[in-house]
Amino acid sequence: MAVGCVLVSAAAGCSSGSPVSAPSTSASTVSAVEDPSIPGIGATRHDWDASHAPNPDSDKFGKGAVWGYDPSLPKYLSGSEHAVYIAVGDFGTNRIQSYVLNMHAVDRDDALARVRQELPSDATVAWDLTLDQCYRVGFGSARLQAVTGYMAVVQLEDVQEGGKPAPSPHRFNQAIFSVAMAGSPPDPEVDC
């Protein structure tokens, strides 16, 4: 199972794995902070916890890091715990800043349709980038930006048995979510 800071950091374009600091929220945005229309990336930890099913083996991985259970996911992708979400992190900011979504292999359009379920309803594609082993998309969202200052960056990969991404994938079974400062351009120098 390919998880961890290296995988998540590559999608975000950082090398240290350090969190992106959440901008402070003013009183005028307090109601938006608890807005359930931010379902995945950028959600408050409280909203994430309330809207996602815990994984039965989550105690092995640290509080809040592993969610969902799907025994039909391949073990090499989801581990023996058959987790749908892995490496879920808020890095102490109380906002979800990264995670990996495991899914059954689907074409790019179906993968992007699944990704959109994790984003605010106003999210639009800001840019996309096809690399040798992945497809990366930046999504802008006025709602997400208003409460966090972020945009969502999603890296789609076809992780093969053994944990390596397939070269030139046309199907995808993993989506790596991270945040970047709103308006950040794609970085073709950051490899998959």
Image (cartoon, grey):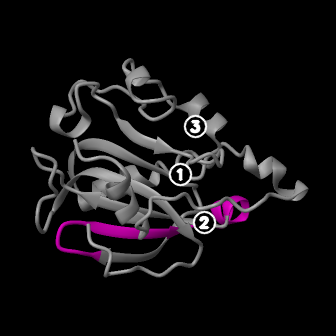
Q: Secondary structure at mark 1?
A: loop
- Please, is residue 71 above or below residue 140 in the view? above
Q: Position of residue 156 (x, y in %)?
A: 29, 59
Q: Is residue 177 magenta?
A: no
Q: Is residue 138 magenta?
A: yes
Question: Looking at numbered disc 1 in the image, what kind of residue is underneath it?
Answer: Ile
Question: Looking at numbered disc 3 in the image, what kind of residue is underneath it?
Answer: Trp
Question: For the point 14% across and 54% down, which residue is it?
Answer: 164
Label 3 Cα crowd, 10 Å radius (few <14 / some 14-19 / many 20+): many
Question: For the point 51% across and 29% down, which residue is it?
Answer: 63
Q: Marks 2 and 3, how far apart in space?
A: 17 Å
Label whose residue precedes the other's in the sequence (1 or 2): 1
Q: Marks 1 and 2, how far apart in space?
A: 10 Å
Question: Looking at numbered disc 2 in the image, what kind of residue is underneath it?
Answer: Tyr
Q: Which residue is mark 3?
A: 48
Range of residues picked out in magenta? 130-148
Residue 41, label in figure: 1
Q: Which residue is mark 2?
A: 150
